[in-house]
Image (cartoon, rainbow, N blue to C red):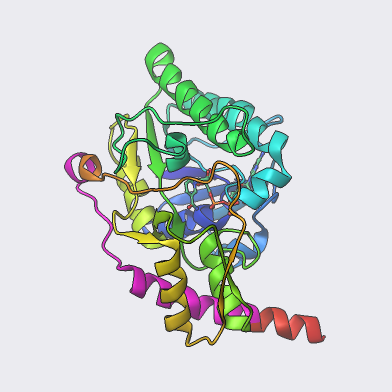
Amino acid sequence: MKALVTGGAGFLGSHLCEHLLDQGAEVICMDNFLTGGPRNVEHLIDRPAFRIIECDLTGFVHVPDRLDLVLHFASAASPADYLRYPIETLRVGSTGTLHALGLAREKGARFVLASTSEVYGDPLEHPQRESYWGNVNPVGPRSVYDEAKRFAESLTTAYRQSRGTDTGIVRIFNTYGPRMRPFDGRAIPTFIRQALLGEPITITGDGSQTRSICYVDDTVAGVLAMAGSDFAGPVNIGNPDELTMLELATLVKELTGSSSPIEFIERPPDDPMVRRPDTSLAAERLGWRAVVPAAEGLRRTIAWFVDELSHRHRLERL
Ligand code: NAD
């Protein structure tokens, strides 16, 4: 099996590359290092079945190899990143997806799009089922990401229907784990970094908004189950255990043994109030469900952050 992972040097992409290699696949990681970097895959470089191609997916894309699978994960994903790179985010969701689909079609490969729970916007239906069409502000600050993904879903569906490409769409809910960047702006890396450095843990709003957080190994298993099926989706991949942001911050504080105070700061516009996947479709069609409890996943992530922050500290002192 030969797989191409776009965005393979990012957080999720690097875990996908690693799991695919462990399953005996040959893996090409394609990335322009906008929000990810070679460091995320440096532990894979010596594996003969692994190759990395530095390439912007919105430009000319050529892969001479045969391919059986294209996992399209290239896109800034944290709000801080896509607000810094709004046009790049729209371009990779549109032109980048077009190029990745073209490649899958040319090679006769299965294509899986990394879509997102953000297509549901600030949802009026709770929990969110795949049949819900969402509540997205098309001109709000988050729209560069949300609408890019909605367009990417539409494009993927059109390729399946009009070109016969074997496609699948996964709607991934908040995923966390090792290799998230401590300053990427997402809640979990922010809380862990602040707790470990003894800084105030900052919650946006009053902390009553909810998220359902999924450990990266669970998400990867769900994506690979989708890759191995012929299901079109869209299918939710996430952990249905729902926490308020205040509960999440308190859990991080407990698990790190931190004495950081919890502080409340301004909530960004269009921030969803609730978020919980209905994962019955994934269970029924893929035989998949998330199994790692939040406390366990957070413990593993915190252990990685302890190493990462001390590594940075050592570098700063050089
Ligand atoms: P990430 O920022 O760590 O990884 C994205 C990768 O895509 C980076 O390595 C980046 O350099 C690369 N990239 C961006 N634009 C590119 C381009 N034009 N050409 C080539 N490479 C490009 O983000 P992540 O959290 O790993 O997310 C990966 C994918 O999963 C994204 O598509 C995201 O929308 C989706 N997703 C993630 C989550 C999550 O919780 N992490 C949730 C829902 C969906």
Task: Report x, y in % for residue 50.
Answer: 54, 55
Number of labelled discs?
0
User: In the displayed structure, would residue 25 be above or below residue 62?
Assistant: below
**Position of 316 relative to 92 (above/below):** below
Query: Residue at 55% across / 37% down in the picture?
Result: 65
**Is residue 229 visible in the rendered structure shown here?**
yes
Q: Which residues are magenta?
A: 283-309
Residue 226 appears at what percent x and percent y?
32, 41
Q: Nearer the viewer, residue 237 or 50?
A: 237
Q: Residue at x 42, y 36 (%)?
A: 120
x 47%, y 45%: residue: 272
Foreground residue among 80 and 307: 80
Question: Does residue 190 belong to the magenta stretch?
Answer: no
> Which secondary structure type mostly characterizes the magenta part of the structure?
helix
- As drawn, the residue found furthest toward the left would be 284
Image position, residue 287 (x, y; %) = 19, 47
Q: Where residue 223 appears, x then y in whole percent?
A: 37, 47
Is any atom of residue 56 visible in this view? no
Which quadrant of the rendered structure holds the C terminus? bottom right
Within the magenta stretch, is there residue 290? Answer: yes
Using residue 193 as the reference point, say whether residue 238 is left or right of it.
left
Between 223 and 182, which is closer to the camera in this rendering?
Answer: 182
> In terms of image quadrants, where is residue 110?
top left
Q: Residue furthest right?
A: 318
Q: Residue at x 52, y 76 (%)?
A: 304
The single residue placed furthest to the top in the displayed view is 162
The quarter in which the N terminus is drawn is top left
